[in-house]
Image (cartoon, helix red, strand yellow):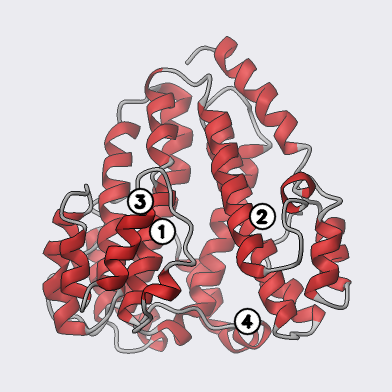
């Protein structure tokens, strides 16, 4: 796209940027006594108009409203984008469909019934009827068959053997990511100039991080790990990913895995994992070696946030700016939802703040 086209997009993103929460905003939210107080305070932010639609505080409703806000903002940014950059941002919108399907399958694998899945918010492509059919399925195999008419079915069906061998639902949720990012990368390769460089830096790093964490989570898988990972290599090559999938413990990484682009971040997370883990109030779900990986996953995500921030506040005439805004907005909304959950769990304020990835 031309500089003129990006001037319009940047003006739009600039207006949205001014409404993002600051460190002071976050601290004000964290320091209140209860989740109800946080809910009241959130009405004074850019989310106020949407939050005001909720009569009485309910975390599920807050999640729905905030996630809907994110999707609407993404759509506003897509409008006005043309050519391959526009196609890239339009396909990136499928992240919301992918995220919903991953959550639905994870709940199903954990034994939750249709009532629990009914709490999920449908998207334009993943309907309430489809979610209900996943909830009604007798097992995961049948749930995958429910998705036979969707673009995700082939990858999910291919991953069923790995799921049967490991019992890890992560093998299936990774198949959804594999499909979505593989298609995204095909569109990305059509970009040129600074558009291609900036998009490759952000999306390539994101794919690398997913593959690194996936290789570590699936260390017990005896099959070919390459068949499960996203088939894109940016700065983490096959040799590195295979080595990561074969180490028996994180303490062996320095001797068993070749040094590569993300080594310093991973090494720092391992050295300080006790301190990092003790500051994190919740464990993530998803199967595999999750507890031991949490510090590594957390630090790699911080790296990705930093890359997006640098892109967001740097040179503005390329696709990296709207890409970074969408990513950072997603992080902001996830921060808010996490803060609500931690406040409800009566986690102390200092731990809540350490758990969130706050703006500089």
Give whichever of 200, 162 is nearer the camera: 162
Mark sitting on residue 276: 4
Residue receiving disc 1: 100
Q: For label 3, count other residues whose C-alpha is less than 10 Å away and answer few (under 14), some (14-19) or many (20+).
A: some
Mark pair 4, 2: CA separation: 21 Å
Please name the residue shown 74% across and 67% down the image: 57
Circle nearer the viewer, 4 or 3 = 3
Q: Quadrant of residue 49?
A: top right
Q: Are marks 3 and 1 in contact (CB under 8 Å)?
A: yes
Q: What x and y, as percent, mark residue 178?
A: 27, 55
As drawn, 39 above or below 304: below
Q: Earlier in the sequence, mark 3 or mark 1?
A: 1
Cβ atoms at labels 4 and 2 below 8 Å apart: no
Residue, disc 2: 332
Tag in front: 1 or 2:
1
Residue 157: horizontal and vertical position, in percent?
13, 63
Residue at x 16% of width, y 67% of height:
159
Residue 253 in view of the camera? yes
Task: Name the mark nearer the viewer: 1 or 4.
Answer: 1
Discs 3/1, front: 3
Q: Nearer the viewer, mark 4 or mark 2?
A: 2
Could you classify mark 4 by the number of other residues whose Cα lies within 10 Å: few (under 14), some (14-19), or many (20 or more)?
Answer: some
């Amino acid at each position: 796209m031309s500089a003129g086209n990006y001037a319009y997009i940047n003006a739009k993103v600039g207006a949205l940027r001014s409404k993002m929460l600051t460190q002071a905003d976050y601290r004000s939210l964290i320091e209140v006594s209860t989740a109800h107080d946080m809910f009241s305070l959130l009405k004074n932010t850019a989310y106020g108009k949407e939050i005001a639609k909720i009569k009485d505080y309910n975390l599920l409703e807050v999640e729905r409203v905030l996630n809907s806000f994110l999707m609407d903002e993404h759509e506003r940014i897509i409008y006005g984008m043309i050519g391959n950059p526009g196609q890239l941002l339009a396909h990136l919108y499928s992240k919301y469909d992918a995220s919903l399907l991953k959550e639905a399958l994870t709940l199903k694998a954990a034994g939750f019934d249709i009532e629990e899945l009914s709490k999920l918010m449908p998207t334009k492509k993943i309907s309430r009827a489809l979610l209900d059919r996943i909830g009604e399925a007798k097992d995961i195999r049948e749930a995958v068959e429910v998705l036979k008419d969707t673009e995700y079915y082939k990858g999910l069906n291919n991953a069923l053997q790995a799921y049967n061998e490991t019992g890890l639902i992560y093998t299936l949720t990774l198949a959804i990511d594999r499909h979505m990012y593989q298609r995204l990368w095909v569109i990305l390769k059509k970009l040129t100039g600074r558009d291609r460089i900036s998009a490759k830096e952000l999306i390539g790093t994101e794919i690398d991080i997913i593959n690194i964490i996936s290789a570590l989570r699936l260390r017990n898988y005896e099959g070919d790990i390459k068949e499960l990972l996203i088939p894109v290599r940016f700065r983490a090559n096959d040799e590195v990913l295979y080595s990561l999938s074969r180490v028996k413990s994180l303490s062996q990484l320095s001797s068993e895995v070749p040094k590569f682009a993300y080594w310093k971040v991973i090494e720092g997370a391992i050295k300080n994992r006790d301190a990092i883990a003790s500051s994190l109030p919740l464990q993530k779900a998803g199967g595999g070696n999750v507890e031991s990986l949490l510090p590594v996953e957390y630090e790699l995500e911080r790296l990705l946030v930093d890359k997006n921030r640098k892109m967001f506040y740097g040179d503005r005439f390329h696709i990296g700016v709207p890409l970074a805004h969408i990513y950072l907005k997603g992080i902001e909304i996830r921060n808010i939802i996490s803060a609500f959950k931690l406040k409800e769990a009566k986690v102390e304020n200092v731990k809540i703040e350490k758990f969130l990835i706050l703006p500089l």
